[in-house]
Image: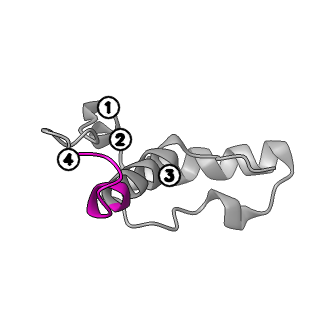
Amino acid sequence: RSEIIKASSALTVANQIIDKMQQGKVVSSLIEKINNNSFLESVSKDEIDKLASEFTDVRGYPKALSRLVIDRE
């Protein structure tokens, strides 16, 4: 079982999976990048980290789960 604390992490991982699938010619290239999300770009990494940290506290999860482990583009 896995639970993603931050939506930004899910989108980053999903985009990386799509990139790998395109490199391997599993899917044809997309005309536009699908990771353009003006909402996520309007929220700072610090704001995301703070809220994710609060979620881990409330849910009793380790703090390490609240950290963004993939570079935010």
Q: Hey, what amino acid is under mark 1?
A: Phe
Q: Which of disc 4 and disc 3 is earlier in sequence?
A: 3
Q: CA distance from mark 1 to mark 2?
A: 7 Å
Q: Which residues are magenta?
A: 20-28
Q: CA distance from mark 2 to mark 4?
A: 29 Å
Q: CA distance from mark 1 to mark 3?
A: 14 Å
Residue 34 at x, y = what percent? 26, 38
Q: Which of disc 4 and disc 1 is earlier in sequence?
A: 4
Residue 16 at x, y = what percent? 38, 58
Q: Residue at x 81, y 42 (%)?
A: 58
Name the disc covering residue 29, or none. Answer: 4
Outermost residue toward the top in this view: 39
- Tag nearer the camera, 1 or 4: 4
CB under 8 Å between discs 1 and 2: yes
Instruction: Look at the numbered disc 1 and give the secondary structure of its residue.
Output: helix
Give the residue number, with chain letter if any, for mark 1. Answer: 39
